[in-house]
Image (cartoon, rainbow, N blue to C red):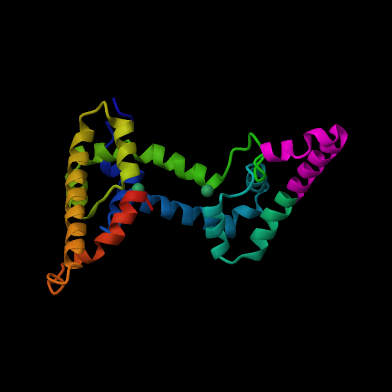
């Protein structure tokens, strides 16, 4: 049995969140993750950065990945950055000093080997970006629920048919989580149809670049198809 199968769809906290994320412009799971990341960054800036445990886990995890570091940077908050990066650079300087001392003790023979093998940026064994981890945890909770909501709840099913999407990475993940269960085939069939329609719109864009057909009108879906294609292919 899929976890959560007997839950009433409307009572699950992720049910309405997913409905709200069906906007026809991209994948609903990617949208949900974007919202979650925004919430994490806001709560970090407004309260959690004052929490000793939160600071410690950011420092122990080696800071944020490039994508999430840039998102935090966009908020333009010097104090938050000072708190996060002061300790990270102190840790890094300490670690590099140890490496350099080790090389000195070993002599010229092994010079540079350990610095290369450490990858230069992150220490071995650190858990990595905490925001990435939160995204993976949310994906794990939500992806198996999607085919269940689709199978059991008419409002969810109708909303998905009209304005829902799953990107290729998330559709494949839904399939991987739920492939042993019959619920999954229906939502995948609906999304396959949507990919086929998208491919037709893209073919129309190609065709209308020919001077013989360039005067033909395009529908709104067709005009947006090239951007939707990137969102649904890459999952962003
Ligand atoms: Zn996605
Ligand atoms: Zn990250």
Q: Main secondary structure of the magenta part?
A: helix
Residue 95 lies in the magenta-colored region:
yes
201 and 7: which is toward the camera: 201
Question: Is residue 197 depicted above or below 115 in this figure?
Answer: below
Q: In the rendered image, is residue 27 in sight? A: no
Residue 41 x/y as whole percent: 53, 56
Count of numbered badges drawn on the protein: 0
Q: Residue at x 16, y 63 (%)?
A: 207
Residue 26: % across, % down: 31, 55
Task: Give me the residue at 31% from left, 51% from top.
Answer: 232
Question: In this rendering, would 163 be left or right of 115?
Answer: left
Tell me which residue sits at (16%, 68%) in the image.
218
Q: Position of residue 82 (x, y in %)?
A: 69, 59
Q: Split into 4 quadrants, where in the image is the N terminus?
A: top left
Q: Position of residue 102 (x, y in %)?
A: 83, 35
Q: Quadrant of residue 187?
A: top left
Looking at the image, which is closer to me, 204 or 25?
204
Residue range corresponding to the magenta coloring: 90-117
Is residue 100 visible in the rendered image? The answer is yes
Residue located at (18% from left, 40% from top): 189
């Amino acid at each position: 049995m899929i976890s959560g199968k007997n839950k009433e769809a409307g009572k699950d906290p992720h049910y309405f969140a997913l409905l709200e994320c069906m906007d026809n412009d991209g994948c609903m799971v990617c949208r949900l993750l974007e919202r979650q990341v925004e919430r994490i960054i806001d709560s970090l800036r407004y309260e959690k950065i004052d929490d000793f445990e939160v600071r410690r886990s950011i420092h122990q995890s080696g800071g944020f990945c490039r994508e999430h570091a840039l998102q935090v940077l966009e908020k333009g908050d010097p104090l938050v950055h000072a708190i996060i990066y002061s300790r990270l650079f102190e840790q890094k300087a300490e670690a590099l000093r140890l490496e350099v001392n080790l090389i000195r003790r070993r002599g010229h023979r092994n010079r540079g080997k350990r610095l290369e093998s450490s990858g230069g940026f992150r220490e071995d064994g650190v858990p990595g970006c905490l925001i990435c981890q939160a995204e993976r945890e949310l994906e794990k909770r939500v992806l198996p629920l999607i085919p269940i909501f689709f199978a059991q709840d008419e409002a969810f099913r109708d909303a998905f048919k009209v304005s829902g999407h799953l990107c290729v990475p998330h559709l494949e993940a839904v399939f991987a989580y739920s492939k042993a269960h019959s619920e999954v085939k229906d939502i995948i069939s609906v999304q396959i149809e949507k990919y086929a329609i998208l491919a037709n719109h893209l073919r129309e864009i190609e065709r209308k670049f020919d001077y013989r057909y360039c005067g033909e009108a395009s529908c709104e879906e067709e005009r947006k198809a090239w951007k939707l294609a990137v969102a649904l292919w890459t999952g962003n």
